Image: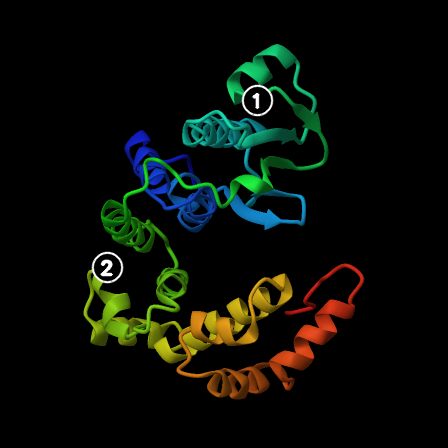
Amino acid sequence: NRIYSPSAINLLWLSASTSATVGAALEQLTRFFPIMSTQVRLKLERTADESRLLLTPVGDPHVQHIEAVLGYLGRGLNQLDDAGKGLFKRATLGRTPEDLSSCHRLLECDEVVYADAYSITIAHSMLDQPLVTADAFICTRLTDTLQDMIANQPSPDLVEQVKRRVQLLLGSGDISVERVASPLNISPRHLRRKLSQEGTSYEQLVDEVRRETAIRMIGEGELSLTSIAYELGFLDPSSFTRAFRRWTNMSPTSFRQQVSELPDGSTGSS
């Protein structure tokens, strides 16, 4: 668990800068953020007025690690904002720093506030802003490279590696065992044997990833149920509905309604 090499971080930012819009760049950052750090989880949250990148600690990282990651993100976002239109609105720190002036300088942000979390607030109106550095050809190839890097990150847990790879392939139309095994440098047959030794199977892990992702996506409330079905790699919405009933004993529609009635928006999943 660490901040990875500058080369890997630069590759991630290059991928973001070649995205079509600011919003697409932020999605790219959150998707491949483990290349930058495995001790912090990055999530893009959107409201009616603004969006923010929320940093959540994984395990018990040192506070300086989180702040270093926040600094990387702040400087990177300012580089994306080449026209100076105010992409980076506000930085939120989980503690009050000893040297406020240094904090402003390192984050390259005029407004810094203090709360119980670390985040970067982004002007919501900027998400659809096209990037002058956009290049679909390069972005596609960089995305392929980043997918391989994510799948090949060192991990003592083969099950988690497989689930991480399946997560990346969801919605591609091909989540075959061959596509998962290849970046792990093992044959599909060997992968199945090793998973069997772990007390699971490839099909079971795919099912788990789909279940976890479906519950999360429905809870977020951003996509239609039809869109979620295709994002999860189902051939049609009815197949998704049958699978979701098997997972939860509820239809996706009933589950979404139940989630919307919760006061805190929690999915209540286990």
Instruction: Please name the amino acid that badge 2 sits on.
Output: Pro
Figure check: 92 above or below 153? above
Crowding at label 1, few (<14), some or many (≥20) Cα neighbours within 10 Å? some
Residue 125 position in % (x across, y down): 57, 41
- On residue 109, which mark appears? 1
Marks 2/1: CA–CA distance: 39 Å
Q: Is residue 88 left or right of residue 256?
A: left
Where disc 1 sits, the SS reads loop
Residue at 41 percent across and 27 percent down: it is: 82
Q: Quadrant of the N terminus?
A: top left
Residue under label 2, please give it. Answer: 183
Q: Quadrant of residue 261?
A: bottom right
Q: Residue at x 27, y 52 (%)?
A: 140
Q: Is residue 140 left or right of residue 265?
A: left
Q: Between residue 174 and residue 193, name the one nearer to us.
A: 174
Q: For mark 2, does the 10 Å Cα neighbourhood hold few (<14), some (14 to 19), or many (20 or more) residues?
A: some
